[in-house]
Image (spheres, rainbow, N blue to C red):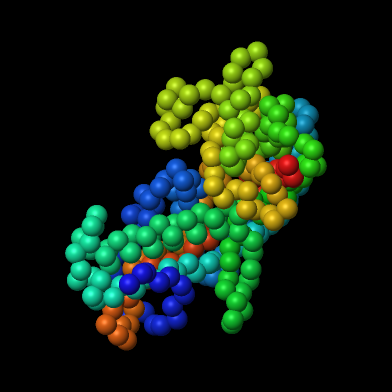
Amino acid sequence: MTASTGAFTFGDYSSRESLWDQIKDLEPIETYVSSNSGKVDVTNKVHSWVVDPISAMSAQAGTVELTDTSYSATNPSVLTNMTQIIEYGFRVASSSQNTKHAGFSDKFAREQLKAMKNWKNQLEWSAVAGSLVSGTGTAARQMKGIAGFASTLATVCGSSVSLTSAMLNAYLMEALNQAGSHDTVLVGPALKTRISMFTENNTRSIPAKDAELVGRVDVYDSDGGRVKVIYHRYVNSISAAVTNALVSYASDYVQMGFMDEPHYEDRPNTGYFKSGAIVGEATVQVDNELAVQCVKLLS
């Protein structure tokens, strides 16, 4: 019997140990953001956090002796995201579970591992490219991905524009000038190839081993500093109109939060089969909108 996946609405009959440590280790390069982000506490499906403004200095300022200082204050603002319930169920017929299989010994364990991978992939997709949906009694809540937090540092390029090293340098310098030093760049296959081929007086991409990085990660020395260039399988999904997208961010400002950490739950068996699900509720937090930049290229 093939595994079935989908949303289950039955109650929680039993819960076992948290699977987040195992899920976090699944494909850490393929699911880079969710595997490498910090962790923040989430206590409500409407997750909000206080944001203090980042100010860039544009001129030298001093205070005259024997004079009182000037006073000014900017009230902090609040950013909000929604938690998203992610659930992948699976079902194995008892006959199939009791059958000897080629390549694996436990059909149910194999389907559980596949569900864990699907859960992790969905979390990564939503954390990067998700659109905010508040949800209703009949519509699921969905989190806003990090690309959706980029408001000041948001650029849309025309259909005839191709990414160049000068453009990438300009984007990263703009982030730096806005007081947001970005250290990570997410790109799809086309832009990853273009960045790898950048040359000026010399090749500016350097091998990952020289930067003490492990995995399929390239490092690019830009005018705004050294950044990690990550091939990301979901970054081009941030908009239906986008052919190629580039998202840069300051990694210290991006965090994952769990109101319910991913775990395995048994599901009721109403026939000669066994059912289970991997389920959890999560969201992503961007501590300041200047920490994320989104560039949409239409070609």
The answer to whether residue 52 is seen in the rendering is no
Viewer-closest of 189 and 68: 189
Residue at the spot x=63%, y=31% of the render? 194
Viewer-closest of 262 and 106: 106
Residue at the spot x=64%, y=61% of the render? 131
Q: Residue 36 location, x and y as percent?
A: 46, 45
Residue at the spot x=27%, y=82% of the render? 272
In this picture, is 224 found above or below 75? above
Viewer-closest of 152 and 68: 152
Q: Residue 271 location, x and y as percent?
A: 30, 85
Query: Looking at the figure, which quarter contains the N terminus?
Result: bottom left
Q: Residue 64 location, x and y as percent?
A: 78, 29
Taking 169 as reference, is 48 left or right?
left
Q: Residue 177 location, x and y as percent?
A: 71, 33
Q: Residue furthest top?
A: 201
In this picture, is 173 found above or below 254? above
Taking 197 as reference, is 272 left or right?
left
Residue at the spot x=62%, y=53% of the render? 237
